Image (spheres, rainbow, N blue to C red):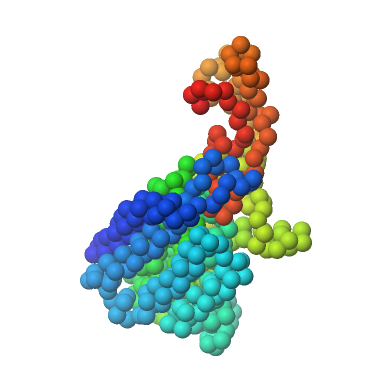
Amino acid sequence: MGQPVREYLLTLCVTAAVTYLLTGPVRKFAIAAGAMPEIRARDVHREPTPRLGGIAMFGGLCAGLLVASHLTNLKSVFENSNEPRALLSGAALIWILGVLDDKWGVDALVKLGGQMIAAGVMVLQGLTILWIPIPGVGTVSLTPMQGTLLTVALVVITINAVNFVDGLDGLASGMVCIAAAAFFMYAYRMWFGYGIEAAAPATLFSVVLMGMCLGFLPHNMHPARIFMGDSGSMLIGLVMAAGAVSVTGQVDPDLLNVKAGGLREATHAMVPVYIPLLLPLTVIAVPVADLVLAIVRRTWQGQSPFAADRGHLHHRLLEIGHSHSRAVLIMYFWSALIAFGAVAYSVNNASMWIVLGIVLLSAVGLVLLLMPRFTPRTPRWAEWMVPPRYRRVAHATAPAAETDGESPAEPEEEREPVPAGINGATAIGDRSRFVEHRRAGSHR
């Protein structure tokens, strides 16, 4: 087992390194090509930020699959399955569509059609859902038409869920990386724990996806130097969906029953996927929840589901007082709790310690969410020991003599908030959430 782990680690490092090294040149190319969103009224970043980060991520995907195809243990995935080729074909189509959208803009319905075509290409090459395990019924085999429709639906939902959540620096890539890590643990256990070869492609997809996100994150953390754009968000969404389809719809529960040594053990192992496609949805639960809420909110208001607004979960975190970095970390926390909690429950769903741990961490997460509502105030004699935000006395405004004839600076609490941008075209920070009136020469 040691050698496969080393090969996965090598694939991860190569994918991350190629993505990281390509992102710098891609940024320069995006600036030269003019692939930068204009500063809009709802944006707060001061300078246009280039997109097309998906180009570097696609390069990392190709490099990771190429390296894996020459490794001793992982090359069997390419010899025994056509799924890696199916993934690469669908990824190329969705990537090209994303690049066109980042540069010239593509209508929402055209993008939806392109997503369905990319999913259909993967289905034609064998990456499709074949059966679904249903409690009390057993394994239900799907007809080709049913499998195709379910696969296309899962791919489209996952792509748009990731695309919708891409609204803060480092948010989408970090959340997808967390989900991919949890999915890798589950798929690796299916392959090497139970010897089920059908789980091998999903394991590889998860490792490559982690490498793509880790390589891009250093360039995308706040303040972002480049956005992944639709070329990146749709790409990583499709790779995530491909792993979900592979491990959920192609691993035969009856085979797991034999490998696990009995019905009881197999039931415990397959708990997260007894409800169709539950595990793939749990590892991206936060993006999917954001997607569903956005569609309901917009249709309820009589708008198009694709209309831009500021009602996303990360925007709400900023509105209640969280900083950019804290909002991203909170979203990371909830993604990790749901994804790893589902995986831990699939390993041992009879343990009350796992349930209690999830409940306790959920309580911690709720406290973090409500923290700005309960900002503590320290005694006056101890104010010098704490950050300014915890002090009772507001910042004194500058004297009129020091403002060079300008009006005194507004207290930060009274500044008018500027709406945030969406869909990866935002670089919101602690200092840029409000319109600032600074005097010339200010060191801030």
Q: Is residue 360 above or below residue 191?
A: above
What residue appears at the point 29 percent right and 80 percent down from the top-left corner? 79
Q: Quadrant of residue 161?
A: bottom right
Depth check: 278 or 52 in front?
52
Q: Position of residue 237 (x, y in %)?
A: 49, 64
Q: Position of residue 83 (x, y in %)?
A: 39, 77
Rendered-image quadrant of the N terminus: bottom left
Res. 77 in view? yes
What residue appears at the point 57 percent right and 74 percent down from the top-left corner? 113
Q: Is residue 112 above or below residue 128?
A: above
Depth check: 326 or 34 in front?
34
Depth check: 61 or 55 in front?
55
What residue appears at the point 47 percent right and 43 percent down from the top-left corner? 222
Q: Position of residue 357 (x, y in %)?
A: 52, 50
Res. 343 in view? no
Would residue 131 be found to the left or right of residue 320 on screen?
left
Residue pushed farthest top? 401
Q: Is residue 443 above or below residue 130?
A: above
Q: Quadrant of residue 206?
A: bottom left
What residue appears at the point 58 percent right and 26 percent down from the top-left corner? 438
Q: Quadrant of residue 202?
A: bottom left
Q: How many marks?
A: 0
Would residue 408 be found to the left or right of residue 364 on screen?
right
Depth check: 367 or 328 in front?
328
